[in-house]
Amino acid sequence: MSGRHGGVQRLLQDELGREIPYVHRFNHQLHLVVVHAMSGERAIGDLFNICNVLYVKFTRKPTVAAHYQGNTLKRLLEQRWTGNLATVQIILKSFQDIVELLRHVENSASFPADLRMEAAGLLSRILKPSFKFHTQIICKILSLLEPANRMMQSEETNLQTAVQLVNTAKECVEALRTEKVFTEMWSECAQEREDDIHPGANAKLRYQIMTWNPRGTIFITQTLDFEQTKRYRLHVVASDGKWEDSDTVEVAVVNKNDEPPVFTVNEYYGSVTEELDGSPVFVLQVTASDPDKDANQEALHYSLHGQGASPTSSSCHGDVAESSPAGTSVMEMTATDLDDSAVGHNAVLSYRIVGCLDATTDGAFDRDSYLLVVEARDGGGMMGTRTATIQVKDINDHAPLFKEHSCLARVSEKADINAEVLDLSAVDRDTGENAQLTFNVKFYMVSHRQEQRGSLRLKKRLDYERPSEQRFNLTLKDIAMGTSIARLLASDSDSGQNRDLTYSLLDESNPDGMFTVDQTGVLTVARPLDRETSPQHHLIVVATDHGIPPLMGSATVQLSLLHVNDNGPEFEEVYTRSQNVFGPQNPPFHFSVPGDYRHTNDFYLQDNLNGTASLTALRTFDRERQKEFLIPVVMSDSGVLPKTVTSTLAVTISDQNDHAHLPGEKNIVINSHREPTMVLEKVYSPDPDDWDNKTYLVKGHMPSYFMLNKCTGFMMVKDNAPPGIYQFQVRVIDGVWPDAVSKVTVHVRDLQDEAIHNAGSLRTRVSPDDVSVFSLADVRERTLDVRFAVRAGQSYLQPEKLHGYLAAHKRK
């Protein structure tokens, strides 16, 4: 609110006797956001520090300002950036005047030495391309925000308008963040500095357009129009104060298609009788012309928009692969609304599917084409519809299936090569190329792809007495790593690289990498085998040729492992309760405890003689005295050579809420230096019970800069907490004992950049964990004793040695 009738604005006007400008809260918030963003960039801070020094020490001092010919710099304000925009605009506009002023001060003996040195330092900094580059960037960004700044000062600005203004400015600023824009700006700045980086007395050039714009670089000051003026003639003079030269520059304006077509009449009126047959029916004729010079008037195209207009295309088309997951993008449909998008919601569109006109199947099970009706509705309730045709594309997601589950064929051992043995047929639920089948076996196969059948033929004569198999059965026992267990050979009837083979194991059959196969087909044990973990292995060895595309064949190797007594008994699980029963693995097992443990009065272990044992507590326990007991348990099996193993049974004493929690007090000191949200410590409430479920609630008021996790009791501080001392109380609840109220005091100290840049240091050859600062004591006024210790190995450094380090570091 402005408060112009009875608020702060009116009181100030009455006190000062003049009009006080009204600043909208949205406008003020925009200024705070921009100032905060700029203060976080060091380069921008350095830029405005230079501008402030120029304003205070050079352009405002009468003795110095008398030699300045440029525009007056503006004073910078921390809470508003309009002065920053005006300053960078003047820097760019009067840059050469500022350079000449600094050079005059640097080279003139009439000025103090410190001012001349400062002028020389400023001159070297502003002549760097980075200074001009940063100035142009800030000028562009703040100029884009200036329209929003002006419009948000209006009393009629509401939240929706303010959001639209900020979003528009944000999009314009983001458009600057491209490599092309930055490269062009940097190249321009670097070239300008290269042309005059070390000038002599006679090399200071002055550019002037005698009847135009006094600049060495020619800019346009307003939008040019080819239809009004097609060519400009400029007279340019370059002078160094003594010599000069002139030239004529002709600027030709290039025509562009920037004029929209114009109808001969603003509004047309026509009429048509309803329910007429024999459409189309003539209603009226409209004409338009293109104001662009030399435009082809016959190239104009007319289209109809709005309620009742027929669309140029009645349907949109899209496709999607079958079996695609939910949420897969299929197609994009866009509608246009000629209403003003900046006013109300009439141009805000929403889309939905209102129906499915047809769903036709192509006979391929789950692949269909769909005809959908999509509706676009604006905020005023007007709508339009369009149909969308979705074609579901086939993917190769079905494996071919033989029509016969098993086939039996008989062939004479005297049969000739290429004699037909069996005719097989298979089906594939895919379509097109995905349904064309190729039949293949280890021997010889003829495929009839289009007919979806294959012929199995002999490649060589058969010998009944020597049948060959594709499946190998091996039995292994106590095999060491690196042992070769089999060699498999494959053959390929192709030639060249098409018959070169590579052997590998299918990952699914060898998930743990227990076996390997080399390129000669030798199968080797790669890791120790354990029958208790996996008694059998089914390996699939794949032979792949080097053709394009590569073809492959496979063979299955079955490995059975024999059992040996190489494991002692083990507990099935980790037991952590006061009474448990052990489950068997390979009974019978026997359980006992070592002899020196049998006389304790804590627990008793009983062997149930059935592969299990029971543990019984002999007394009551208190968790606050001892939380855990470790019981050694001896297990032995019944093998010919029995093996014994000793395991440790951990018995954890559960907690009972038999102690009240008490109020506590926590003091926390943090140094804040633009840190993000940070987790502090836990609210302190002493309680011997450590399994209680507590709830932590704020009592009274907690500053908004802090947060409390009510389940864990941990506190967090936000990144914008200002320096100060904050105190609050937390109620601790466990549902059994009375609530306790703990106090929390947080000291937030501001660690400034200047403190970090000017921090002292002491260099020692120790780790950070070996240094302890344990006392800061005020001895007398402006005297502070800092006491610290440094650990070196098992002991601490003597004070004399620490003082020596300090003295040596001081001399350096």
Image (cartoon, helix red, strand yellow):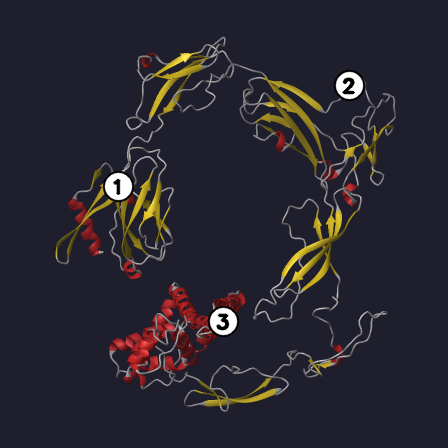
In space, the residues marked 3 and 2 are separated at their CA atoms by 84 Å
- Name above or below for residue 212 compared with residue 384: below
Name the residue carrying label 2. Answer: 466
Circle 3 residues within 10 Å: few <14, some 14–19, many ≥20 = some
Image depth: mark 3 or mark 2 in front: 3
What percent of the width, then of the height, locates residue 744? Answer: 28, 48
The amino acid type found where label 1 is placed reads: Pro
The amino acid type found where label 2 is placed reads: Arg
In space, the residues marked 2 and 1 are separated at their CA atoms by 91 Å
Name the residue carrying label 3. Answer: 185
- Name above or below for residue 395 compared with residue 528: below
Q: Secondary structure beneath disc 3?
A: helix
Residue 592 visible in rendering: no
Q: Please tell me which of labels 1 and 3 falls first in the chain.
A: 3
- Name above or below for residue 167 compared with residue 390: below
Q: Secondary structure beneath disc 1?
A: loop
What percent of the width, then of the height, locates residue 725? Answer: 26, 55
